[in-house]
Image: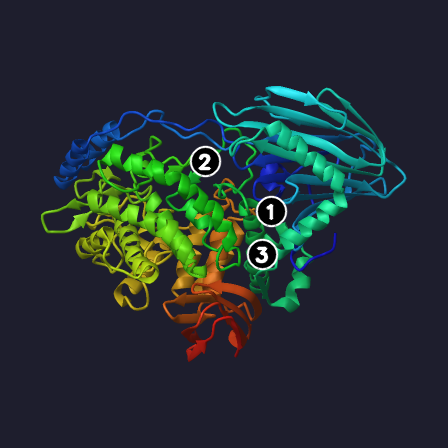
């Protein structure tokens, strides 16, 4: 394996899977996390969740919601919460969880001496993990990658010395092992995950120059200088026989041979990975790439290392995106596609009050828009269920989803924590994000077929759902500002409220997106839903400022119980939304004050929250504060394998940080393209190839000392844009299919 532009390494074994080396092919993931003596491999598959589709009872009445509204109007917040908690809950209460497929242990017997010169890392250019060390003066190498074409995880073990390898391999799913199958060169485990999917996970010896044996649940290899192992997991989530498909994939990969499988992996992965390239201070890359990750993180407040880490973690985020989202059925969950616990935090599921959405913020700009297919697939599963939820729970037309979903597209109220579950905005946020994604390629057929109808279903729901108050305003609720609480003047603490700012910002964006989409892609203004969207916008309360100039989180100027709360939901309109911009000067400054207040009071203490703050400052054009927030992220929220630590491990921060980098580099608003609007001062020189922008735009450019030095712009359609960089403006006309060099 050659040394690539971006490769990182650690000089000691992982303490557990959360510090291991991840690989993935979209559908399957693996983590290498063992020692020289016992190598370990965690296997995951995207659809291997415990439990099947749930149908819930305890459906509230429309009158129940109206009573809760009246209690809130009368200032009886705690009474409203007690009543709402009793009336608006579900049975069963929780979603099931994403689980490991299996754990592999490879025990080596040839040498029990202490390993020396131990290194492990990931070569991002090649999409592979590696381990190297010496024992008794003899060198050993291990190499791991995930093949998309062959749908296997491949591991090569090798030594170049005279002492041959001798090891045993076991595969287990303790305590959920149900049926084992032994073959001459392979072992399999199969069963059913609760009442959900049936699965099969297999391990095979593909090739070795040693002798092999299969006995019970073990594979044995002796007298080998190399051994090539294959692993595969299949489920019946999309139909089929998991055992036949698993055995078939392993057999096909074995027949092709390890090297052929690896070459095909490099071709497939490389085409995606090289679709965008970012280099920052390239002349310093070699100097910093010679340092192991713990040293880099320890020194991350140094400008040079911070700049290097910004480029490295951006490249890593793209790697993780490909590994967890390419050409698969389901999107990346809270942990991407890597989870080593059978009872993971927050079920390792899909939390849609920011976390799932954040996972895909950088996809389009980073040249990985194809990874959105899995995000859209989930929404397609959610749509019919969300229509039923709207009718059953709220007595409304249209589509709604709450704060969590799963592989079956659940949209109901789930959970027992009121500050989270009482939030019917998750589906609308996802719909708005899908529309923004569609504006990159502007595929009119797809927009007309699914995106606009989905937005229309959201509009229909909000038209029925919004409460008409005595002042003529249409107000959301009862609901929450995700996971936050407020204090009333009489000292009561509550989360349930009417008219949370984030609700209205999301609703406003959905309605505006629908109107814009109908006019652009249907070329009409006569639909029934069009009129409903107009009415919503006419009556929806605006985003308001408090006495101190901060943006209000609720319609009333309540005191925040936790001023440094991790969710900064009332700034949705700044990022990822479009409501707050330089054109809305008061709100723009209000957003700055809101951020400052949050940070002064301890905000940003989780990895994903810090990444969101980075996005805010990038959109505000504040490169200095973005730099500070990046350094804090590297210092406090990044593990030695560069995974974001909430804590615990949660992948959204990796993707959110990458989105902030893209926002700092180049962004489009209407026909205005701003380049280098928020780059930190320490990013002295840089090069970008293939950054995507909405409207079928692709940019390649370089800068020196913060100033643009070259620019090439490609347009998939004829259009006129205004280029802005460091106060210099230039209007240019682009022809369809033209690469314009400036």
Q: Quadrant of residue 144?
A: top right
Q: Quadrant of residue 133?
A: top right
Quick check: marks 2 and 1 in contact, CB under 8 Å?
no
Within 10 Å of the Cα at label 2, are there few (<14), some (14-19), or many (20+) other Cα atoms? many
User: Compared to 659, does 135 lie above or below?
Assistant: above
Judging depth in this view, the residue of 524 and 470 nearest the camera is 524
User: Compared to 690, does 174 lie above or below?
Assistant: above
Can the viewer see residue 35 in this picture? Answer: no
Residue furthest right in the image: 162
**SS for tag 3?**
helix
| Distance between mark 3 and mark 2 Cα atoms | 28 Å
Mark nearer the viewer, 3 or 2: 2
- Position of 69 with respect to 384 (left or right) is left
Judging depth in this view, the residue of 17 and 400 nearest the camera is 400
Q: Locate residue 585, reporting x and y percent.
A: 28, 67
Q: Residue at x 24, y 40 (%)?
A: 397
| Distance between mark 1 and mark 3 Cα atoms | 16 Å
Tell me which numbered mark, 3 or 2, is placed earlier along the sequence: 3
């Amino acid at each position: 394996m050659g040394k690539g532009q971006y490769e990182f390494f650690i000089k000691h074994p992982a303490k557990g899977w959360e510090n291991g080396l991840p690989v993935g092919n979209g559908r399957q993931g693996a983590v290498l996390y063992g020692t020289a003596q016992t190598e370990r491999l965690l296997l995951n598959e995207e659809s291997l969740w415990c439990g099947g589709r749930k149908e819930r009872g305890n459906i509230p009445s429309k009158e129940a919601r109206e009573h809760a509204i009246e209690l809130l109007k009368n200032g009886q917040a705690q009474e409203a919460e007690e009543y709402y908690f009793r009336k608006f809950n579900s049975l069963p209460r929780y979603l099931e969880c994403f689980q490991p497929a299996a754990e592999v242990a490879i025990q080596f017997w040839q040498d029990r001496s202490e390993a020396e010169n131990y290194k492990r890392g990931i070569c991002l250019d090649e999409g592979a993990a590696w381990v190297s060390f010496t024992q008794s003066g003899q060198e050993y190498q291990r190499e791991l990658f995930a093949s998309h074409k062959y749908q296997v995880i491949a591991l090569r073990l090798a030594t170049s010395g005279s002492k041959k390898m001798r090891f045993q391999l076991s595969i287990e799913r303790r305590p959920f092992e149900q049926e084992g199958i032994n073959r001459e060169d392979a072992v399999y485990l199969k069963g059913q995950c609760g009442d959900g999917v049936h699965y099969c996970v297999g391990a095979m010896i593909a090739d070795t120059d040693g002798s092999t044996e299969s006995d019970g649940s073990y594979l044995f290899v002796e007298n080998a200088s190399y051994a090539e192992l294959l692993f595969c997991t299949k489920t019946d989530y999309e139909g089929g026989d998991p055992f036949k498909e698993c055995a078939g994939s392993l057999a096909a990969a074995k027949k092709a041979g390890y090297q052929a499988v690896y070459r095909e992996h490099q071709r497939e992965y490389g085409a995606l990975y090289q679709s965008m390239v970012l280099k920052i201070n390239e002349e310093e890359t070699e100097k910093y790439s010679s340092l192991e990750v713990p040293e880099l993180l320890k020194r991350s407040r140094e400008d040079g290392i911070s700049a290097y880490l910004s480029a490295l973690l951006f490249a890593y985020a793209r790697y993780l995106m490909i590994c967890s989202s390419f050409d698969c059925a389901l999107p990346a969950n809270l942990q991407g596609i890597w989870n080593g616990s059978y009872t993971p935090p927050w079920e390792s599921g899909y939390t849609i009050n920011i976390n799932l959405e954040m996972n895909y913020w950088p996809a389009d700009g980073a040249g990985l828009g194809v990874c959105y297919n899995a995000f859209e697939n989930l929404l397609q599963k959610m749509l019919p269920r969300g229509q039923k939820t709207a009718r059953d729970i709220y007595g409304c037309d249209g589509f709604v989803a709450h704060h969590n979903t799963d592989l079956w597209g659940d949209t109901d109220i789930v959970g027992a924590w009121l500050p989270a579950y009482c939030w019917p905005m998750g589906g609308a946020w996802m719909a708005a994000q899908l529309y923004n994604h569609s504006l990159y390629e502007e595929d009119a057929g797809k927009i007309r077929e699914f995106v606009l109808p989905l937005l229309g279903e959201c509009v229909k729901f909000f038209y029925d759902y919004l409460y008409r108050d005595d002042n003529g305003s249409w107000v959301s609720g009862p609901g929450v500002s995700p996971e936050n609480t407020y204090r009333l003047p009489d000292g009561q603490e509550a989360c349930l409220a009417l008219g949370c700012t984030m609700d209205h910002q999301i609703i406003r964006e959905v309605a505006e997106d629908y109107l814009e989409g109908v006019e652009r892609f249907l070329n009409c203004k006569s639909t029934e839903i069009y009129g409903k969207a107009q009415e919503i916008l006419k009556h929806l309360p605006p985003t308001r400022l408090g006495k101190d100039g901060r943006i209000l989180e609720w319609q009333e100027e309540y005191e925040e119980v936790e001023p440094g709360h991790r969710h900064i939901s009332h700034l949705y309109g700044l990022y990822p939304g479009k409501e707050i911009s330089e054109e809305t000067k008061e709100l723009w400054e209000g957003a700055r004050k809101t951020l400052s207040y949050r940070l002064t009071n301890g905000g940003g203490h989780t990895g994903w929250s810090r990444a969101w703050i980075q996005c805010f400052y990038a959109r505000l054009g504040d490169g200095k504060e973005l730099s500070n927030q990046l350094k804090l992220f590297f210092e406090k929220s990044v593990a030695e394998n560069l995974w974001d630590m909430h804590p615990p491990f949660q992948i959204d921060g990796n993707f959110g940080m990458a989105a902030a980098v893209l926002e700092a580099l180049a962004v489009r608003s209407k026909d205005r393209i701003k380049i280098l609007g928020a780059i930190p001062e320490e990013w002295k020189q840089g090069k970008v190839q293939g950054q995507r922008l909405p409207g079928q735009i692709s940019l390649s450019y370089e800068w020196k000392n913060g100033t643009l030095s070259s620019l090439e712009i490609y347009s998939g359609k004829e259009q006129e844009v205004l280029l802005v960089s460091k106060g210099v403006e230039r209007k240019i006309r682009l022809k369809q299919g033209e690469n314009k060099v400036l």
